[in-house]
């Protein structure tokens, strides 16, 4: 499986499994634009497609790399375009400087390395001496960074007698780092100049393709460009060329002998919608197949989520007001939320308007659309089980943190718990539940009970001198939570229930008490010889609870 392989030539010559996306070449030429910008989330095949374009168009390419692929059937197109153009191909994904000067040096590194690819021109007699001098200056990072891509394109155009293709992968990566490290204006100015020289009124340019994760506003860096063709994740054009379609995923599983894992693959890694096409995350599918082929582990993993930062979900939860918290809850339950999306953003303006976060979550792949409306709004939802897990995890940790900030409330909680004051315990818990994300009235039963269970565990673990255990074998079953006061030698057993209706709270809390007795959970403490053991049955429904004790 081609894990981490984003070079098309390496992928083909080393016989990695390849999902054929060469049909994109035909569609790109049929819908030709001078500047083409593709916006897709990370890990959806942007880099490998850019490498594919480079290998197809670049003069001197190994045409055999495309044998047997879809584009090879387009005989006339291949004769006219394959291996016919000089190409400038760079990626800005490694521009990660902590300061503007560091980031500028990173960009110099990238462009200098590309100039070195054409250093053979220094030996060509028909290349003018001043052009050789300028090329050396770019290679040695001395001058002309802003106009470097335009200069290279002119030089290649004159040398080969063919117009030039410019490919820029992850164009927005420097802007993200600049925003994070407080040199955004300087980086916007630099990128605007580089792009302005290379992509506007460049007589040597045939066409260009840029990719990125975020659609940056035209006024920010594209102000000097004339009508770039922007292909967002909402656009029906090119919707099948990023991500794996269902047919492609089925063929991969069949080829690898993993057909029986289709349903779990679909549940965990499908669900994204680009334009009108449903797609799987390629990074997930490839890593999942690799796991199934090479290990005995059959439990799906959070491959895509774990390949990047999830700070945006945490930030979303922390900034949410009560209405937004309810909407987060609806998403976790599997419902949709209708929102009007802002397609053009600047990194600086992202957090200025609270509703911008919905657009960021959508563009970055944490949400997808089910229905699009004429007013620009969409019905948004969580795409699959993997992303749902990260929402639940981040929201739970946020809620626990909010609870732990309330020191006075926790003091009252522990006093009521030790004394057996069930009414006071209910008041404390209900107060904290009132501040929670409202995803507790639908969806998966285990998710809801786990939320309440995790809340209690988080609260108990703040108490010094108490030993807290979760889901431990006790008697003839597993006790939800056991608590042992190491100093006072007092023990507590808590069984948690989820009630479908408020009217069931008392009955379910009593059932929790009965379960502790019926399954003899007290035996868990048989070696500790506690002075006392108190049983708690706690039933939750939405933002209410009922506490019983004996």
Image: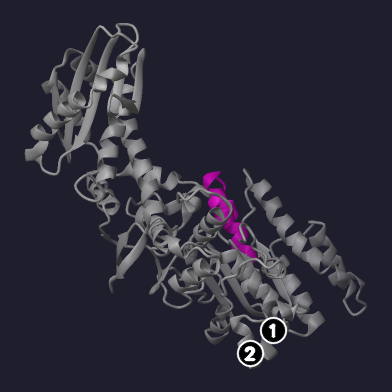
| Residue 77 tag number | 2
Q: Residue at x 76, y 60 (%)?
A: 112
Of mark 1 and mark 2, the one earlier in the sequence is 2
Within 10 Å of disc 1 (Cα), the crowding (few <14, some 14-19, many 20+) is many
Q: Residue at x 38, y 74 (%)?
A: 276
Within 10 Å of disc 2 (Cα), the crowding (few <14, some 14-19, many 20+) is some
340 or 56, which lies in front?
56
Residue underneath mark 1: 82
Q: Does residue 427 show up? A: no
Where residue 355 appears, as percent x and y from the top left, is 32, 54
Residue 393 higher or lower than 192, as above or below: above
318 or 466, which lies in front?
466
The span shown in magenta is 173-194
Q: Does residue 473 show up? A: yes
Where residue 411 appears, as percent x and y from the top left, is 25, 17
Q: Is residue 214 left or right of residue 332?
A: right
Q: Residue furthest bottom?
A: 76
Could you tell me how far apart the alpha carbons at marks 1 and 2 are, in whole angstroms?
Answer: 8 Å
Residue 175 higher or lower than 406, as above or below: below
Quadrant in the picture for the C terminus:
top left
Q: Residue at x 86, y 66 (%)?
A: 133
Secondary structure of residue under mark 1: loop
Label 1–label 2 contact, CB within 8 A:
yes
């Amino acid at each position: 499986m081609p894990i981490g392989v984003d070079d098309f030539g390496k992928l083909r010559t080393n016989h990695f499994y390849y999902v054929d996306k060469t049909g994109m070449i035909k569609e790109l030429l049929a819908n030709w634009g001078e500047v083409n910008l593709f916006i897709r989330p990370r890990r959806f095949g942007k880099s490998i497609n850019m490498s594919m374009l480079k290998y197809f168009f670049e003069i001197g390419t190994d045409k055999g790399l495309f044998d047997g692929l879809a584009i090879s059937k387009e005989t006339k197109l291949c004769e006219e375009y394959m291996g016919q153009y000089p190409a400038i191909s760079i990626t800005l994904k490694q521009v990660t400087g902590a300061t503007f000067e560091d980031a500028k040096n990173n960009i110099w590194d990238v462009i200098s390395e590309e100039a070195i690819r054409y250093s053979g021109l220094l030996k060509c007699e028909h290349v003018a001496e001043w052009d050789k001098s300028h090329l050396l200056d770019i290679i040695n990072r001395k001058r002309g960074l802003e106009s470097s891509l335009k200069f290279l394109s002119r030089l290649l155009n004159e040398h080969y007698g063919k117009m030039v293709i410019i490919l820029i992968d992850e164009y927005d990566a420097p802007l993200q780092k600049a925003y994070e490290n407080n040199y955004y204006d300087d980086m916007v100015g630099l990128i605007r100049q580089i792009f302005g020289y290379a992509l506007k009124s460049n007589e040597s340019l045939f066409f260009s393709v840029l990719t990125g994760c975020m659609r940056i506003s035209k006024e920010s860096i594209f102000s000097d460009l004339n009508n770039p063709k922007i292909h967002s994740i909402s656009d029906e054009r090119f919707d099948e060329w990023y991500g794996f379609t269902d047919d492609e995923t089925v063929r991969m599983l069949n080829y690898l002998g993993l057909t029986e894992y289709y349903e779990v693959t679909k549940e965990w890694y499908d669900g994204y919608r680009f334009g009108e096409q449903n797609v799987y995350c390629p990074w997930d599918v490839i890593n999942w197949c690799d796991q199934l082929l090479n290990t005995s582990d059959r439990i799906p993993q959070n491959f895509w989520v774990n390949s990047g930062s999830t700070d945006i979900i945490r930030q979303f939860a922390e900034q949410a007001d009560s209405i937004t918290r309810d909407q987060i809850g609806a998403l976790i339950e599997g419902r949709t939320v209708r929102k009007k999306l802002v397609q053009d953003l600047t990194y600086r303006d992202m957090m200025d308007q609270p509703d911008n976060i919905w657009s960021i979550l959508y563009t970055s792949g944490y949400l997808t659309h089910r229905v699009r409306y004429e007013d620009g709004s969409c019905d948004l939802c969580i795409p699959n089980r993997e992303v749902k897990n990260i929402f639940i995890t981040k929201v739970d940790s946020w809620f626990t943190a909010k609870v732990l900030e309330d020191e006075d409330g926790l003091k009252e909680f522990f006093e009521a718990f030790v004394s057996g004051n069930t009414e006071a315990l209910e008041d404390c818990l209900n107060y904290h539940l009132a501040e929670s994300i409202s995803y507790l009235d639908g969806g998966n039963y285990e998710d809801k009970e786990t939320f309440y269970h995790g809340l209690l565990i988080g609260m108990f673990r703040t108490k010094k001198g108490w030993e807290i255990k979760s889901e431990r074998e006790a008697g003839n079953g597993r006790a939800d939570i056991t608590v042992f006061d190491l100093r006072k030698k007092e023990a507590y057993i808590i069984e948690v229930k989820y009630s479908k209706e408020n009217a069931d709270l008392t009955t379910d809390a009593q059932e929790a008490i009965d379960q502790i007795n019926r399954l003899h959970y007290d035996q868990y403490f048989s070696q500790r010889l506690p002075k006392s053991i108190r049983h708690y049955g706690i039933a939750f429904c939405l933002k209410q609870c009922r506490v019983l004790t004996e």
